Image: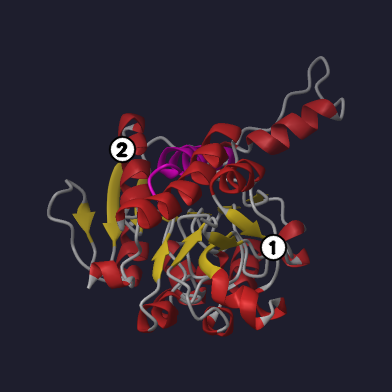
Amino acid sequence: MSRIAVLVPGKMHERALARLKERYDVIEADAASLDAEMAKRIRGVAVSGTFKAASIDALPNLEVISSFGVGYDNVDAKHAATKGVVVTNTPDVLNDEVADTAIGLLLNTVREFPRAENWLRAGNWTPGKSYPLSRFSLKGRHVGIYGLGRIGQEIAKRLEPFKVKISYHTRTRNADVPYDYYPTLKDLAEAVDTMIAIVPKTPQTHKTINAEILSALGPEGVFVNVGRGWTVDEEALAAALKSGAIGAAGLDVFYDEPHVPAALLDLPNAVLLPHLASGSVPTRNAMADMVVDNLAGWFEKGEPLAPVPETPLKG
């Protein structure tokens, strides 16, 4: 009996690829490049990049798409659902890593630790000469979390020992959390002096962090983004940082990665990371395992570990 054929279009984590090859007949190619006979053989896809409607349509017997990452906007899940194709992602296994990164990025932004280290490495620490006092402190801040999903809640839990006030904005109020809820993003921005964005890429979140929101955050305000660059109007953010409309920003994600606007690179009050929130060996290995286990769950039991909300399994 021939093995199930799984398509891997583009780059895939080495651990996932190795495990896939142990179980399945892995075809490393773009969907559009397959001949009709091969296209009919494909029952599953493991993807770490884009997989849109045309690619789904090119595979007549496709059953499941396993996406590497918690965000799955790179896969046309709604179109897949119309075809009866299950889409899965890799949530939860990266929650802690991303939440840890958010706290580290917040501290680096407020206390200027990266700049201080660079100052030291440049030989500036000499007798009688100290690094300037940081303008901001985390002490006494009011932190607003924009997006209180699984990762947002992990960030909030980590913030509690810092003795800061915590509030949040999401589309709907969460009655199970003790934090103050604000019904609009502007309401949240006006109330807090620190904002952490951890929302997904959706039409509703496009450039919601704009000049109006940044102005409401204020000149003592600090903005941190570990969600999606899609959420931020980067031109408005750069202008706000340059003018002093807000105090500082820490960014792990950008609108057009890996392109980072020069206007942000040139700012001393911006801490910039290369989208590494989940970027540790243990976490990426766990994500790779989940890509494979989602496929195995579907093919062996009809029960993938993490079907996304749009998938046929979710109604």
Whether residue 8 is visible to the viewer of this picture, yes or no, is: yes
Above/below status of 118 relative to 299:
above
**On residue 10, which mark appears?**
1
**Magenta part of the protein: which range?**
90-108
User: Are the two marked residues, 2 and 1, in contact with CB atoms closer than 8 angstroms?
Assistant: no
Q: Is residue 141 left or right of residue 44?
A: left
- For the stretch drawn in magenta, the main secondary structure is helix
Q: Amino acid type of disc 1?
A: Gly
Instruction: Using a 10 Å C-alpha cutoff, classify the residue at mark 2 as few (fewer than 14 neighbours), some (14 to 19) or many (20 or more).
Output: few
Residue 255 placement: quadrant: bottom right
Measured as percent of width and height from the top left, residue 13 is found at: 64, 47
Instruction: Using a 10 Å C-alpha cutoff, classify the residue at mark 1 as few (fewer than 14 neighbours), some (14 to 19) or many (20 or more).
Output: few
Above/below status of 295 relative to 109:
below
Above/below status of 223 relative to 99:
below
Front residue of 246/273: it is 273
Q: Quadrant of the C terminus?
A: bottom left
Measured as percent of width and height from the top left, residue 48 is found at: 59, 59
* In magenta stretch: residue 288: no
For the point 56% across and 52% down, the residue is 24
**On residue 1, which mark appears?**
none
* In magenta stretch: residue 97: yes
Judging from the image, the colouring scheme is secondary structure
Question: Which residue is disc 2 drawn over?
Answer: 157
Measured as percent of width and height from the top left, residue 43 is found at: 49, 67
Q: Amino acid type of disc 2?
A: Lys
